[in-house]
Image (tube, rainbow, N blue to C red):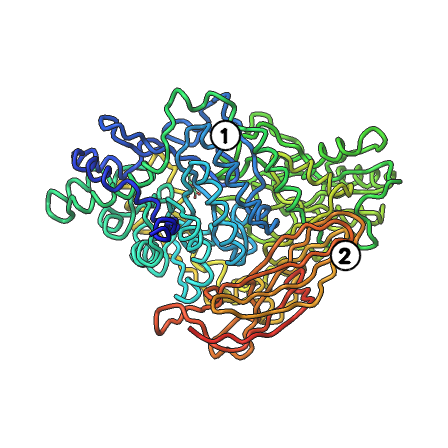
Amino acid sequence: MAAACTRPVAPQDRLLANEAVIDAVIAQMTLEEKVNMLHSKTNMSSAGVERLGIADMHYADGPFGIREEGVPDGFQSAGWQLDSATYFPTGSALAATWSEDLAYDYGTGMGIEARLRGKDVILGPAINIQRLPVGGRTYEYLSEDPALSAALAMRYTQGLQDRGTAACIKHFAVNNQETNRGSVDAQVDERTLREIYLKPFERAVREGGAMCVMPAYNKVNGDYCSENEHLLNEILRGDWGFKGYTLSDWGGTHSTMGAMLHGLNVQMTGSNYLGQPVIDSIRVGRLTEDMVDEKVRQILRVRYAIEAIPDDVANTKMTSQPECREIALRVAEKSIVLLKNEGGLLPLARDVKKIAVIGQNAVLKTQSGGVGAGVKALYEITPLEGIRRRAGADVEVAYAPGYKNFPGRRWGPAPAQPDPLVAAAIDEPADPALLSEAVALAREADLVIFFGGTNKSIETEGSDRADIDLPVGQNEVVKALAAANPRLVTVLISGGPTDLRELEPVSPAIVQGWWNGTEGGTALAEVLFGDIAPSGKLPFTFPVRLEDSPAFALGNFPDKTQGGDLFTMLYRQDLTREQRAEIMAKLPKPVSRYTEGLLVGYRWFDTRKVKPMYAFGHGLSYVRFEYGEMKASVSRKAVRVSFPLTNAGQMPADEVVQLYVSRPDATVEWPAKELKAFARVSLQPGQTETVRLEIPLDDLRYWNVERNGWELEPGRLELLLGAASDDIRRTASVTVTGK
Ligand code: BGC
């Protein structure tokens, strides 16, 4: 009896707490009231039923800060005063922490601020796999690896929902490119789908209890995600037991019958499919009211699970809160990746008295820009500000822009006063005047810090990068700086990988600094000056050349068919419904083939023995860690390993330990190795701790396409323990029996 009472309720089943109340409410609703809940009310809300005391659902982007309030019918600023939020490090930065605890805290930070703004559902986290180095939304997404993405997605979701706001995980599924995203058909085999692309969603739903899911713009294996029977009904609701509701990506609903029959609850935005046409279809007997009731029930479950904030309580305080800014700082501190540190150039020596900071990315704010989610941050400490504050009065910090900046796709009108430092093209060569100013400064300085990378106009929603080259002649600038002063530290400010073939040989020290949130500059300065040891690890591979990465090597990307981007049409107010339909019918039908299968990211590089520039999981420290002997055992439920880890350095530091598995005798195809467990460990100088890692046997199963189910193949497993995917320190071998 006691055992039955204390048995934990599965996260999705918590949504079933109010079924009786929901029955009673549905019984009182008119068909019109019900259908009114199946589409948007404003650009960021869907309706409740005022007469019955059911509040509207209020949405906000997501994923890295609560987005500025928009006008009711669009994304333009509403011009509010209290909606400045905390800008959290973007997705790839969060993932570089490899910290489940920080992902949880990040979620709580988002939740706290969402509540202040009266938001019920956050459109995030964004958890698609980073399949392409050029992907426009790489910075929003977490990792190229499903296990890392899944663990962080689950914890972010829990943190957010523990603070009383629903997570809407996005974009479900296989939205791995922006090119033609509104119409592209991602053709992916079932095993790859389950093991790679769905894993983060599965954990966020099953273990994280995500209450909402956003079907993506694209098609998967022939059907739009918003009406994809396999994804929404069979897998999400059937296999994973999802009890909440789905809302289409903005403009991503495509038909009344498809959406009604195949798993969509709410059309965002508009009502042309899930408004009056639903009522008409019921009248002519093509749909039934029971179908509508079921969809309303799923929405109401979330409505009752989330406390509605009354209008006069919401938005009475500034959104950005000190405790959330503190979380943003902690995430930023642990995300910075030291890629290279030849000759121990970092941390900065105490005798450095004059620093030349070169490069516009040192002063660029990254909270918004480009298309899509951004944050109106209460403040944002840029790298230059962070360095100046930390350097204090004794150290002179001089700045030169070094290169022009580059505009790209962006919302809203062009600035009235064009900035003379903004160039027209991203592949323009270095500007001679800016270059010579930078070189002169570098010559006089004790040390140079060059800030390169991309910006939010280049890495943006709605388009992919054409390549991963460093823009506007940055290679030329960095080479000239290196010739002028060999004490050169390079900091890359970007959300995704860049081509470092020219920069790497001339830069003794390289740091990946990300788009690191409100306190990004503070965290960066702490790392550069050695107040803390860097401890981030790459969540994706830096290829040597773009063509080395799997989708490019196999000719799967770029798409051969262009011009199918329905998204670019969505916001054209000048088109009538008929004109849109006509244009859509004529759109090409682009396809994206995923023939690399399981070999995404490092799985490809390792299996095909292609050497990357920097491997997945790579990241150096200012201390040395010693990995002691690993002990491994297998129980009925899990593989367990333990080993002593020692901080052999002079300062406190964190290490992210990584456990990969390889299956040398497998009868089915298997990548050379796969990440199966990891942990972030904090150690004082000289301290040794026994680290324990566990791999549930369930995580070692593969998707058996013939049996259509998960299966554990018996046999030998090689356990590879290390500091990076290419830095394995200890190995052991165990045998599992199948199940
Ligand atoms: C994006 C979503 C976002 C939505 C609302 C879409 O264009 O793909 O990620 O949540 O807009 O802003």
Q: Which residue is mark 1?
A: 413
For the image shown, how many numbered marks are present on the structure?
2
Measuring 86% from the left and 31% from the top, which residue is drawn there?
394
Measuring 47% from the left and 47% from the top, which residue is drawn there?
126
Q: Is residue 666 left or right of residue 729?
A: left
Query: Is the CB–ligand 1 distance for label 1 below 8 Å?
Result: no
Q: Which residue is mark 2?
A: 624
Measuring 42% from the left and 46% from the top, which residue is drawn there?
169
Picture quadrant of ligand 1: top left
Whether residue 655 is visible, yes or no, is yes
Q: Amino acid at mark 2?
A: Arg
Q: Secondary structure at mark 2?
A: loop
Crowd band around label 2 with a 10 angstrom C-alpha radius: few (<14), some (14–19), many (20+):
some
Q: Position of residue 229 (x, y in %)?
A: 29, 56
Picture quarter containing residue 322? top right
Q: Is residue 24 left or right of residue 129?
A: left
Whether residue 428 is visible, yes or no, is no
Q: Position of residue 33 (x, y in %)?
A: 20, 33
Query: Alpha-carbon distance for marks 1 and 2?
Result: 51 Å
Q: Position of residue 243 (x, y in %)?
A: 32, 48
Q: Is residue 590 left or right of residue 617?
A: left
Q: Quadrant of the C terminus?
A: bottom left
Q: In the image shown, does 552 or 168 lie closer to the viewer? A: 168
Q: Is residue 406 left or right of residue 69?
A: right
Q: Amino acid at mark 1?
A: Pro
Up/down of 24 relative to 193, above or below: above
Q: Position of residue 386 (x, y in %)?
A: 71, 34
Q: In the image shown, does 161 or 245 lie closer to the viewer? A: 161
Crowd band around label 1 with a 10 angstrom C-alpha radius: few (<14), some (14–19), many (20+):
few
Q: Secondary structure at mark 1?
A: loop
Disc nearer the start of the sequence (1/2): 1
Q: In the image shown, does 380 or 635 lie closer to the viewer? A: 635
